[in-house]
Structure formats: C-alpha cells, structure tokens
Image (tube, rainbow, N blue to C red):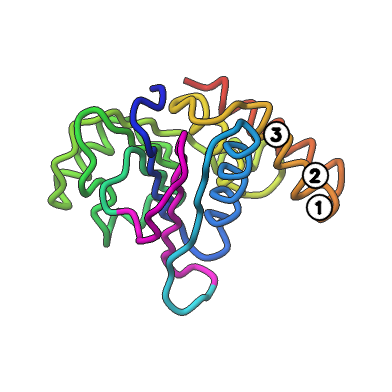
C-alpha cells in the first residue's frame, strides 16, 4: 500500500509501558528523514503502566495544518490484543485500509472477534506475534519495535533503512549497542514476515 492521498493517518493502540509512543516517534522521525511532513502525539488518561493509550501519527507530502486527534485512520496498529475487549479499534476503517495487530491468532479469528465486538471491518488484517518475536530475539516482550517492521512492509510509508537509523539514533545511547542490534534484528524479522 503506497501513500495515495495527501495525509496518511495512523492510530497506535497500546497500554502504558508497551512503547506505542516510542514507535510512533520513530516512525514519524523516519518519515521526516525520508522528506515527508509528520506529526505524532499521544492521547491518554492518567498515565500508568498497563492503562490503555492511543498515539496518533500523520505523514504527508505537504505541510500538515490540522492538530486534532485522528478519527478516520488509514491504518491501525494494536500492540495489545486485549484492548479489543473494550474498544472497537477498527472504527472508521474501510475495506481499503489496514489493521496490524500483535496476536498469535489468524486473521479470520481476529475478524470474528471484531464482529462479536460490533465492528464491521472488511479491510486487510495483518496479525504478527510481535511478543513472540521480541522474546526470541530481544529476550523480553517489546512489541513496539517488531510492529514497526511489519508496519513499514505493509504500508511503505517510510523506508526500512530510515526506521533502523532513527531507532539507533534514539536508543543506542539509552540501551547500548547490543540491545539496539537485537531490536534492529527484531524489526528486520517482522519486515520479512508476511
């Protein structure tokens, strides 16, 4: 899916501590590196670990004038499948749009769950066991980095090289070279997993 409209809008659903804000920031910085205009900002209630969060990202080929929360996304990322128990994450997604979800379930099983929750999504569902990949490569559940690889492969909204460069720039001093290399490997693994 190539960016075929002026502004490409993404909503990340996660829980506090899962890194949806960091993933959105890395994506925005990577798209900026690729010459696009970007905007990324979180929306959450009382900040605490495990509380549901939403982070919004806009990527455009021209300046972005709007600053309100996204209500009609082109792509939705769900870092924690249990969020679907209380929220219709596919609201306003149409048949040409995308859901990427951290899940061991198959796409058809996720679609059934969406129907049970009252959703009517008919677009493309891309499940990925981001926790599993992260545990295998990084040694702990860090679904946000894994999801970035999948998101870039599916949307082509930024270059993989830009995502990796921004991840290194933001995190290498914080977490060290070894941990950074493992995260990059997890991003690449998800990119290659379709």
Is disc 1 placed on a helix, strand or loop? helix
Residue depicted at x 76% and y 49%: 171
Q: Nearer the viewer, residue 25 or 116?
A: 25
Which labelled disc corresponds to residue 179?
A: 2
Q: Position of residue 173 (x, y in %)?
A: 85, 52
Residue beneath label 1, please? 175
Is disc 3 placed on a helix, strand or loop? helix
**Magenta highlight on residue 65:** yes
Q: Which residues are magenta?
A: 49-70
Q: Position of residue 138 (x, y in %)?
A: 71, 42
Q: Position of residue 165 (x, y in %)?
A: 73, 35
Mark with earlier residue (2, 3)? 3
Judged left or right of residue 20, residue 182 is: right
* Label 2 crowd bin: few (<14), some (14–19), many (20+), radius 10 Å: some
Residue depicted at x 59% and y 50%: 25
Residue beneath label 3, please? 164
């Amino acid at each position: 899916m190539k960016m075929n409209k002026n502004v490409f809008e993404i909503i990340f659903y996660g829980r506090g501590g899962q890194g949806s804000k960091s993933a959105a920031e890395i994506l925005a910085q990577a798209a900026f590196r690729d010459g696009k205009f970007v905007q990324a900002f979180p929306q959450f209630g009382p900040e605490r670990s495990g509380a549901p969060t939403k982070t919004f990202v806009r990527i455009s080929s021209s300046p972005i004038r709007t600053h309100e929360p996204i209500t009609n996304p082109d792509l939705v990322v769900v870092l924690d499948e249990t969020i679907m128990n209380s929220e219709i994450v596919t609201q306003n997604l149409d048949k040409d749009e995308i859901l990427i979800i951290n899940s061991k379930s198959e796409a058809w099983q996720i679609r059934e769950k969406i129907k049970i929750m009252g959703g009517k999504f008919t677009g493309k569902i891309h499940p990925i066991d981001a926790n599993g990949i992260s545990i295998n490569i990084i040694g702990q559940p860090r679904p946000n980095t894994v999801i970035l690889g999948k998101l870039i492969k599916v949307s082509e909204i930024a270059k993989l090289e830009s995502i990796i460069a921004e991840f290194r720039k933001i995190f290498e001093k914080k977490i060290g070279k070894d941990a950074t290399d493992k995260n990059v490997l997890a991003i690449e693994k998800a990119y290659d997993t379709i």
